[in-house]
Amino acid sequence: MTAKPTHLATYVGLLHRSEQTLAESFVTVGQGHQVEADVYHTCQSLAKLSLAHLEKLTPVVARYGEQRHGDDVEEPDRLHADGVAEVRSGAVGLLRDLQDLYLLATLVDTTWTVVYQAAQGARDSELMEISQQCMGETTKQLKWLQTRMKISAPQALLVAS
Amino acid sequence: MLPKPMHPAGHCMLEADTAMDRIADIWGQRTPHDRGTVWPARVDSHLTDGIPEAEVDRWVVSACLLCSNGCGCEIAVKDGRMVGIRGRATDVINHGRLGPKGLYGSTPFASSADRLTRPLVRDGGQLVPASWESAMGRVVEVSQRLLREKGPLSHGFYTSGQLFAEEYYTLAVIGKAGIGTPHMDGNTRLCTATAAASMKESFGCDGQPGSYTDIDSCDAIFLFGHNMPETQTVLWMRVLDRLAGNQPPAIVCVDPRRTKVAEAAAASGGVHLAPHPGTNLALMNGLTRELIVNGWHDQDWVSQHTLGFDDLAAAVEPYTPEHVGQICGIDPADLRAAAAIFGTSERVLSTVLQGFYQSHQATAASVAVNNLHLLRGMLGRPGAGILQMNGQPTAQNNRECGADGDLPGFRNWDNEKHVQELARLWNVDPLVIPHWAPPTHAMQMMRYAEQGSIGFLWISATNPAVSMPDSARVRRILGGEQCFVVVSDLFLTETARLADVVLPAAGWGEKTGTFTNVSRTVHLSDKAVEPPGEARSDLDIFLLYAERMGFTNKDGAPLISWRTPEEAFRAWQECSRGRPVDYTGLSYDKLRGPTGIAWPCNAEAPEGTDRLYTEPVFPTDVDQCESYGQDLTTGASVTREEYLALNPAGRAFLKGAPYQPPHEQVSTEYPLLYSTGRTVYHFHTRTKTARARSLQDAAPDAWVELSGTDAAELGIAEGDLVAVESPRGRIEVRARIGRVRPGAVFAPFHYGYWDFEAAGPDGGQARDANELTMTVWDPVSKQPYFKTAACRVTKLRDGTGPAPAPTTTASAPPDGSDLPPTSGGQPTSSEILTPTPVYPNDPAAGTDAPAPTGTVAGSVE
């Protein structure tokens, strides 16, 4: 690595924060909807995937530095999404919370994509490998959310009181 | 109806015992057979009240309904009553044998004084007798009102593993094309959903690869969480007879209890692996890794006929024997030894049951069994087979006919072409048939009923108030005002007591229909006697509902065009045409022949099919498969596009997943692992078996099994009354110091409250094992986990005698104990026939089996 790529460092920072937010939000949604047993257990295990991604990022952060506020880059901060702090109630509430998780996971997913692209440009094979692994697992999170929303939607929108 | 006698012409009785106590001697006389020879025939029979055989008026063709084995039998009828049962010597499944439940438990229920004989409706909080007109009127009134006000998703149907194919199919059409609800499931979700899910994941479609004849020629049998000696006694007789012959197979047992299988493993030079409850997948990953690192897999076969080898190899790589030993609490050398048996035997048969299906990571662990066979190309030839077992006699039909939520004929809900086929067959708009998401599973239906978004729940032939996890919650849901509950059953079960309308149903022998066992073998069960009082078959009940609801097709004609079981069977045959589960070559007449017949049975295979995948072409083509698959850790659906990209084209899937610890870990508060299961003498919630005196006396009350180590630490002795508690609930039962591994606790799940004299759960004296179990299920099969809860056990008071647990089976006390052996069954008859009849499609047919030389085991004084 010859020059320190500042914007990539900013995005590594964004990745770090959005994975952290996603993990916390999975935990919050799971615990808040504990009575939906599958939601509870799956959210706990999907939260662990995001926490594992954070660990994988550690050596990368060490190499690039984690620049949360790039000197001349403000956009990633605006991109940062707040997590789910508390859950909504009822069947429609569950659906909305799953949608929120989906949005957060999408941010993580596209951020990994951006980082993976930059890693290729930077010929950083370590980051390329980490990105590919983590993108696959983010897809797993997205796909479960999509499946669960598809199952819930008709009952929540048509029948639930 | 069949004339008597049933012994094939020219056959004679070799050896007879006419006073066998089959409570004491569960598996009866040995008829040893050598590898590759036909299993000899032995005809078991029992007539109640000492009625001599000469006084039987007639024998009616049927198959046994008290486990999933599917033994061909005949019902003895005298003076319009069912008075006994006899195995059919010519049936491919049992070669004449029957087990204790079938012998003693098949007929007494029918004449039990407490049968439901009239409909009941709830008035002023009480269930009171009513006419059919008024009871069905109430059902239809609520059903129509909810359809009007809330639409089809307000309806749920929860059935069984004990109805007939004709009944499931009729209900499937009512639910999917009449009402249009995805909320249909059976208690098959509790017993067999993982079997189906594992086959869909591995082979693209449900359908048992193997056959019972694989037992006759295999070199090794792996039983994964399968206590066959208690759950399928007749299948175990076949194994015992191999073990007693020349060239016996090695037995490998995976079970945390020292069952009879574990004893056979020790005696046969095999291995007993007793993993901590909840760690099956780690063990399976270890076995898989051993196959690969030792090069025991068939690389050519794998590359030609499977997809996913590299991913699987990567997934199992971390699971060294030492690592697995730590997770599972087993000796790494034992894991290596078991893998070597699998890896080097020429013909391996694997069987899988609730120890895997009802435990943590159920589908992933069961798929791993399929993987072992695929890695070695170990299927499709005699002795090389897989039996993903069922827990119930007609569970297979619920899966096939679609009353469990799947689309009928193993069709894929996510394949528009499959939905169109059904829409054409039923002449309805495809939009009526719910296919926007996977079908709703039983636990989710209960949740909707809890919330009231399902406001109409019809439960047929099952007892969720006792059999579902977290009983207190289930009782609350069914007893609440938010959901109208209809129950059809033989008796006023714990569930029926909570219903708004109770409909009296006809049982086995009181109606005609077909059902299919684990090995795809279809039997006809003819009506032998009239049902009591006003009881009606479930088919007639569903037909009455459909008629009163006025369900029609696109042309305005009645949606259900059939009136009789045989017409319903023909409708189902048409639905199965061209699918892997092809019934079109069968007929009622053909099924009245000498034996049950295994599907596919069609023009290409008019006599049926003993085993699938004799050519390694799997039903994974995109428009043939039943499912595009799911993520094994989350259950997320694979889309059609993703599936197409894999281009499976007849190849099977190798799928792996990492081990994850169970959802509920032991703690200082709840330091033991709780697991539930069966005993040989009872079936389900004892609706039939407790009404058979020989069976009820053999296992009259609930108990809990502890290891000697844990019992000593807790100051508990044999027979002491103990409290078993989990975060969900508490039971008070007597302790058997038994054969579970230290740290584990086992409770039988059969015992509810209908015949319980004590106060019951509301009075603080519960005994239903499910008071303690968790509401949690497998992400893929959605089968609830009954075998992974944490608990604590405390002594309440000294016992007055031994626990009411049988001593003849896995609930036996440790070796050297002087507890009296369980016995006391009424006399039964058992006759060995020679020569052995000829069995169609038996790969050993034509071999000259040596004359049986077995001695009578455990004979009666």
Image (cartoon, coloured by chain):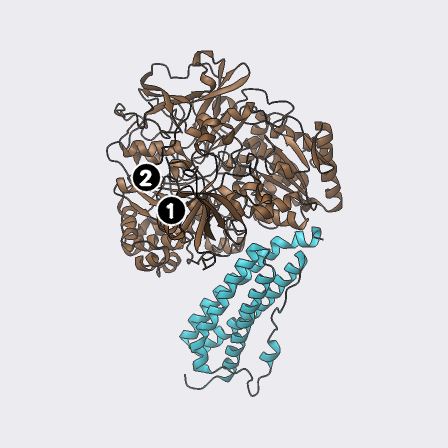
The secondary element bearing badge 2 is classed as: loop
Q: Chain of mark 2?
A: B
Where is B437 relative to A114, above or below? above
Q: Quadrant of the C terminus of chain B?
A: top left
State the residue lying farthest toward the top: B54
Q: Amino acid at mark 1?
A: Val
The percent coordinates of residue B405 (x first, y second) are: 58, 43
Front-most of residues B553 and B137:
B137
- Snapshot quadrant of residue B249: top left
Q: Amino acid at mark 2?
A: Ser
- Snapshot quadrant of residue B327: bottom left
Q: Colour of chain B?
A: brown
Please count the marks in the image.
2
* Residue B236 relative to residue B456: left or right: left
Q: Colour of chain A?
A: cyan
Q: Which residue is mark 1?
A: B740
Residue at the image position 38 percent from the left and 53 percent from the top: B713
Check disc 1: other Cα within 10 Å, few if <14, some if 14-19, many if 20+: many
Front-most of residues B796 and B228:
B796
State the residue lying farthest toward the bottom: A71
| Dot placed on the residue nearer the N-terminal end, 1 or 2 | 1
Check disc 2: other Cα within 10 Å, few if <14, some if 14-19, many if 20+: few
Mark 1 touches mark 2? (CB < 8 Å): no
The percent coordinates of residue B715 (x first, y second) are: 40, 50
* Residue B600 relative to residue B14: left or right: right
Front-most of residues A1 and B670:
B670
* Residue B282 relative to residue B770: left or right: left
| Label 1, label 2: how far apart the Cα atoms are | 15 Å
The percent coordinates of residue B428 (x first, y second) are: 67, 39
Q: Chain of mark 1?
A: B
Q: Which residue is mark 2?
A: B817
